[in-house]
Image (tube, rainbow, N blue to C red):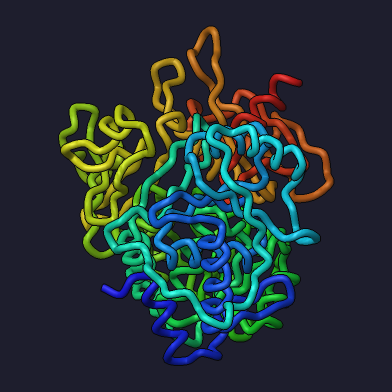
Amino acid sequence: MIDAVQSLLTWADREPQRPLLSAGGRTYSYAAVVSQAGGVVAQLRGAGFERGQHVAMLLEDYDSFFVSMYAIWLAGGVAVPLNTSLPASDIEWLIGKARPAFLLVPASGAKLPAGAAQVAAAASQASPAPARLVVDLPEAPPQPPAFTPVGADETAMIMFTSGTTGVPKGVRQTLAGISVNAGHVSAELGLTAEDRIFVNTPPYFTSGICHFLTLLAAGGSTVGHAGFFFGQNLLAEMEAMGCTGFGGAPAHLVRVVEPLEEAQPTGGLRFWISSGDHLPVRVIEKTLAVLPGVALYNMYGLTEVSGRLCVLPADEIGRREGSVGRPIHDMTVTVRRPDLAPAAAGEVGEIYVDGPLVMQGYLDEPEITARTLTPHGLRTGDFGRQDEDGYLWIEGRQDDIFKRGGEKVSTVHIQQGLMSLGMFRDAAVLSVEDEILGRVPVAFVVPADDEPFKGTQVLKRLKSVLPATHLPSRVVALEAIPRTGSGKAIQAQLLATLEQG
């Protein structure tokens, strides 16, 4: 196995000028990333860094983030990405949990997260307070430092879960797990050194890191660009940057294909990766119609397995609509009943995962780790079903499947039904308490146009695609669904909107 560190060094030695990353109007070759990472290693060692220490990254620019991530690995440290969009109090909590020896922040004048002063102040209050180190992407010193990289079976990263439904947990991942995951996905996609992926997802999310490492495994390159693009604007931007693929959440694909009415010229674009949330069948069908010749890959992943877990090949997406595919090499997925017996084909149950890519455990959470890493494998908390061939369909998280007056209801099915109407650009569904029925679904939608609509009109049309038990009790129109950088709906904000009337 060639790990992610050795892959970088090998490509930098073999083809030093090959482009690896384009971000912020700058392009970095493989050799340039190694050189600048060496400069950050020298900075760390000059500040007293010791091998095995945690180094947190409060960085949102793609170049400073990925250069620093590799610098930490080359120095033998543990990288701790921080979500820069979080409130200062949340970042303080994450820093206190991870106990980093160093906190990497961007150079003066570079992008800073909102409320940067409060974030810096919060970090300084953590106990013990990490030493702050400014990352200005220096060139390597005249005498490049000797690298003592993190070992394949050592912890290389602590990636915090999004915490959209609870307290974030620090997932401990080995370099081998991260590297093998990227290599397997690269092989599934048939990537080559000529491929280049466009990524909107912030670099500190698992998906952003996965896209970068997956292309690196093949000697390819990444274009990192923050902020959503729409329709033909995104297609034009990718063509201008010479991209052959795109990686993002279903929300990205929805925003691109919904405004389009006819097939688009796609230039050199050959593949599109969708992961992070449910991809509606209607969006799949429209994508195949308006982006002909583009291979669409639907994926399912978990931070707890270093990224991607299942991949649906592009040639299966029309025959197995809505499926997230089968597990990647060496990984197994089992759907189990409440008594832990394997579910029958087509039967909904909880998803368990086993194989070499499963995490080491949650940081300083032995009880949660013990409940999650079971004799049957990693208990995901996701529910789904498999067909006779082992293809997986996701039904949602435990909270996404609930009983309404004794009948099981899936928020994922409701969301798919809403999107099938062609009335909305985006939708999300939550269950809320009800005095009579126990829990009922509430739909949040973004209308496709400015025309007003009535909830009764929506419900009438939904009756043709959903059973009565799945009809929302309310339909709430919003200008946009609040989502994380990885595309997941932020439930707390939706509930707050509902409480505010």
Horizontal and vertical percent position of residue 233? 75, 71
Vertical placement of residue 12 versus 477, above or below: below
Horizontal and vertical percent position of residue 379? 29, 38
Q: Is residue 231 left or right of residue 212?
A: right
Q: Is residue 365 left or right of residue 94?
A: left
| Residue nearest the observer in this picture, 342 or 414 | 342
**Residue name at image x 63 percent, y 62 percent:** 200
Quadrant of the snapshot with the C terminus = top right
| Residue nearest the observer in this picture, 162 or 336 | 162
Horizontal and vertical percent position of residue 447? 74, 45
Q: Is residue 58 visible?
A: yes
Q: How many marks?
A: 0
**Residue name at image x 39 percent, y 83 percent:** 10
Quadrant of the snapshot with the N terminus = bottom left
User: Looking at the rendering, which quadrant does residue 229 occupy?
Assistant: bottom right
Q: Is residue 394 left or right of residue 499?
A: left
**Residue name at image x 52 percent, y 8 percent:** 436
| Residue nearest the observer in this picture, 465 or 140 | 140
Vertical placement of residue 16 versus 249, above or below: below
**Residue name at image x 62 percent, y 73 percent:** 223
Q: Is residue 12 left or right of residue 59?
A: left
